[in-house]
């Protein structure tokens, strides 16, 4: 595990990643500490920046924002100035909920959320394609989210953790990916 955290810290982090509203007393009870040492550990993890902030996760579908698209963006000229200018534009586009620079033919992948196809088309035409910085986009509409988590897999940093990838089992019982 990282030198920053031990097994007890990892258990605390696992619990608060699942439910950040747990009280210190509840956390302490679940990890076998009294509240004061548990609070000190949480405070230390916050001070180290391991815990950046606590948020509430909302249901986008229930809020009418369930239309999700992954958009690959190619800039016309990926110079430092243009990259910085494009990234500055993103801060004014609330539809963009995530952005990553990537390797390959595109420069960015955006995760965009809107109310429906019409609203996405408006975003695409009025914002993304209206920028002279953008030379092309490719949209991938999410049909169904199979897995989504905000949890960081902290157990992957544990010493002695197996790095072997589990084998997939086909429906007919045969092994896949072997």
Image (spheres, rainbow, N blue to C red):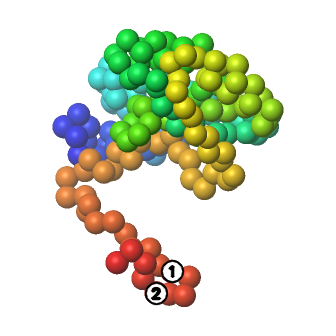
Place of residue 48 in the rendered image (x, y in percent of width and height, measured from the top left) = 29, 23
Place of residue 153 in the rendered image (x, y in percent of width and height, measured from the top left) = 39, 47
- Mark 1: give few (<14), some (14-19) or many (20+) Cα within 10 Å: few
Task: Determine the secondary structure under disc 1.
Answer: loop
Circle number at residue 174:
2
Q: Which residue is nearer to you in this view: 68 or 17?
A: 68
- The residue at 30%/51% (across/down) is 156
Q: Is residue 168 left or right of residue 93?
A: left
> Are dots 2 and 1 in contact, CB under 8 Å?
yes
Q: With respect to residue 173, does 139 lie above or below?
A: above
Q: With respect to residue 170, does 159 lie above or below?
A: above
Place of residue 19 in the rendered image (x, y in percent of width and height, measured from the top left) = 55, 39
The answer, for residue 136, to whether it is visible in the render is yes
- Which residue is disc 1 drawn over? 170
Q: Is residue 104 left or right of residue 124?
A: left
Disc 2/disc 1 C-alpha distance (Å): 5 Å
Place of residue 93 in the rendered image (x, y in percent of width and height, measured from the top left) = 62, 18
Q: With respect to residue 172, does 163 lie above or below?
A: above
- The residue at 26%/37% (across/down) is 5
Name the quadrant containing residue 47.
top left
Task: Determine the secondary structure under disc 2.
Answer: loop
């Amino acid at each position: 595990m990282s030198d920053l955290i031990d097994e007890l810290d990892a258990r605390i982090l696992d619990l608060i990643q699942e439910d950040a509203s747990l009280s210190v007393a509840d956390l302490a009870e679940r990890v076998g500490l009294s509240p004061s040492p548990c609070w000190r550990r949480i405070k230390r993890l916050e001070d180290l920046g391991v815990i950046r902030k606590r948020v509430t996760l909302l249901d986008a579908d229930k809020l009418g924002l369930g239309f999700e698209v992954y958009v690959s963006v190619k800039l016309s000229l990926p110079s430092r100035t243009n990259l910085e200018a494009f990234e500055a534009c993103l801060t004014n586009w609330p539809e963009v909920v995530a952005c990553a620079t990537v390797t390959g033919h595109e420069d960015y992948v955006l995760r965009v959320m809107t109310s429906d196809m019409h609203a996405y088309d408006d975003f695409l035409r009025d914002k993304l394609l209206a920028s002279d910085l953008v030379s092309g986009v490719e949209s991938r509409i999410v049909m169904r989210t199979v897995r989504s988590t905000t949890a960081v897999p902290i157990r992957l940093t544990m010493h002695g953790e197996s790095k072997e990838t589990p084998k997939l089992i086909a429906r007919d019982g045969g092994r896949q990916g072997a």
